[in-house]
Image (cartoon, rainbow, N blue to C red):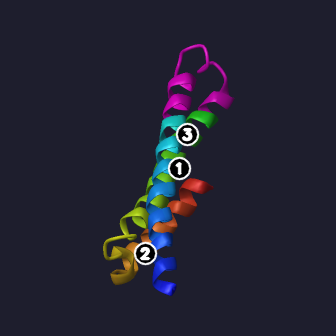
């Protein structure tokens, strides 16, 4: 029974997180397209939202792609302490 739960978790991780990542990147690209227009660049708030969209793309890719990869492949973060710490550091920097 536990092996079937692990298989379900792998399938859900790969499918659901792939959809979430794709929708997140598309949404952030739309935000970048909107806030990079000239009439929006006249306010400082649009610069904040533009940088937040760019950093959100970086954050989502650094956080979700290794989880999707490790569903069916060996997790590279388990073998390298430096890579694990760098990943966590980049995720926290982009989220702040």
* Residue 55 appears in the picture as rendered: no
Question: Looking at the image, which residue is at 49% across and 36% down?
Answer: 26
> Circle 1 sits in a helix, a strand or a loop, which is it?
helix
Give the percent coordinates (x, y) of residue 23. 52, 42
Question: Looking at the image, which residue is at 33% across and 75% down?
Answer: 76
Q: Which residue is mark 3?
A: 53
User: Reading the chain from its start, which is encountered first: label 2 or label 1?
Assistant: 1
Q: Residues within 10 Å of mark 3 (few under 14, many from 20)?
A: many
Give the percent coordinates (x, y) of residue 78. 38, 81
Q: Is residue 17 above or below residue 11?
A: above
Quadrant for the C terminus in the image: bottom right
Q: Residues within 10 Å of mark 1 (few under 14, many from 20)?
A: few
Q: Is residue 21 above or below residue 53?
A: below
The answer for how far apart the CA atoms under marks 3 and 2 are is 24 Å
Magenta-tinted stretch: 29-47
Q: Which mark is residue 20?
A: 1
* Residue 12 appears in the picture as rendered: yes
């Amino acid at each position: 029974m536990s092996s079937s739960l692990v298989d379900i978790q792998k399938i859900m991780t790969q499918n659901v997180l792939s959809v979430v990542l794709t929708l997140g990147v598309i949404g952030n690209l739309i935000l970048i397209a909107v806030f990079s227009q000239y009439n929006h660049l006249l306010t400082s708030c649009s610069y904040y939202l533009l940088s937040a969209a760019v950093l959100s793309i970086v954050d989502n890719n650094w956080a979700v792609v290794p989880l999707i990869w490790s569903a069916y492949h060996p997790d590279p973060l388990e073998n390298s302490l430096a890579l694990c710490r760098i990943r966590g550091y980049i995720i926290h920097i982009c989220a702040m």
